[in-house]
Image: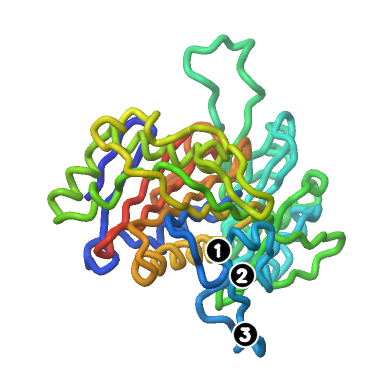
Amino acid sequence: MRREGPGLRVQLSSFDHPAGCRLEALLASHPFTHAVDLVLPVRHFKQLPSLRPAKPRSPRPHAPQLCTVEASCALQPRDSPFYYAAPLALAQLLEPGFAGDGLLALSCGPLDGCDALALTPDGDLHLSLTGESFARLGAAGRRAGGSPGACARRQPPPRFACRVPLRPGSAAHERLVRCAAAAPAPLPCLLARCDADGCSAPLALPGARRLPLELRSRLLAAQLPPLERAFGGDAARASAAAGDSALLASLAEWLGGLALGAVGRETGVGGAAAAGGWEWGACGAAEAWPAGPDAWLQHHRWRGLLAPAHAAAAVATARRAVARLGAPWAAVCLAGFRDAAVAWLPLASGAPPPPRAASGANDLMVLILPKERYLVMTLCD
């Protein structure tokens, strides 16, 4: 079941429904993720969650370390995923064998008067170019128009959006190769690659710095939304809850506050500390959907350049927590890169670029519910 509204796209489905939306394909359609939040309403977890795939490439000779969040708030899991920061020139992208095989690349420089690029895992290069660079490269694209009705003097300089499949032999690729000598200077970029098993793969790139994903884990006492009551009944009841706009808006607000550290009372190695006060009871749907007594809540947050395989690993952990650990629900929140001109691609496969280059301010929230159901909420900027 799918519902849409201004800035909000909602879909309720099931993992075992043949006509349900394919969650894996949806995660793959959001290749550039800046942060992954994993929310688990359970106190103890046998092993600190990681973003490694469920089946590692080879058996580990050591036994996994058993721990709980309160004893290891700053613990980094073994073999943490990683990414790279490096200057990247257009000519490097065009070298045979450089793109593809799951490589992600995203420019991270300023947007004003500068070019931007994004390379998706399937080898498509997305460019946001100034008028000067667009003319020099001769790439096929279209103008990203300004705001309708705005004064001409207040309009930003024109930019042009281009999509070039980096496949040798294609006309667009060959034209870009011929014009690569006129390409702008190398751009500061973030890069990552995952192998076939979903593990981070090393890159041999001059001037590259290898960076680990930043992980922060917290144990909170907080008021929890009654999602098991809203979505745990029969299909008709779950569908009605998925159509409750007040409930969905409050849920998105609560999860956003949790990501900002404004929900619950944090406990850790150093004792208790107030985290904020953005509780469920203050949300608009709290009267119709009151929270129960305070409960324990785990919040794990990874930041960096995360690939779709990392998001899929977080969803698998959330699903396992509901199916095997008795969690009433679990949530995975993905945040895109803000103010990155080509960071977030259209949701629909094959859809044309938006009139203005996407800002990247799109958040994807996946709720793992009882009875193998899941709810996907996309907040579009």
Q: Residue furthest right?
A: 207
Dot 3 corresponds to which residue?
63
Gap in angstroms between the C-alphas marked 2 and 1: 9 Å
Which one is closest to the eye, mark 2 or mark 3? 3
Residue type, numbered disc 1 = His
Q: Residue at x 56, y 9 (%)?
A: 151
Dot 2 corresponds to which residue?
194
Do labels 2 and 3 touch, CB within 8 Å?
Answer: no
Query: Could you say whether the residue bearing mark 2 is in a helix, strand or loop?
Result: loop
Question: Label 2: how many residues lie within 10 Å, few (<14), some (14-19) or many (20+)?
Answer: many
Dot 1 corresponds to which residue?
310
Gap in angstroms between the C-alphas marked 1 and 3: 23 Å
Residue type, numbered disc 2 = Cys
Q: Residue at x 57, y 39 (%)?
A: 260
Q: Position of residue 30 (x, y in %)?
A: 49, 53
Q: Which mark is residue 43?
A: none
Do labels 2 and 1 touch, CB within 8 Å?
Answer: yes
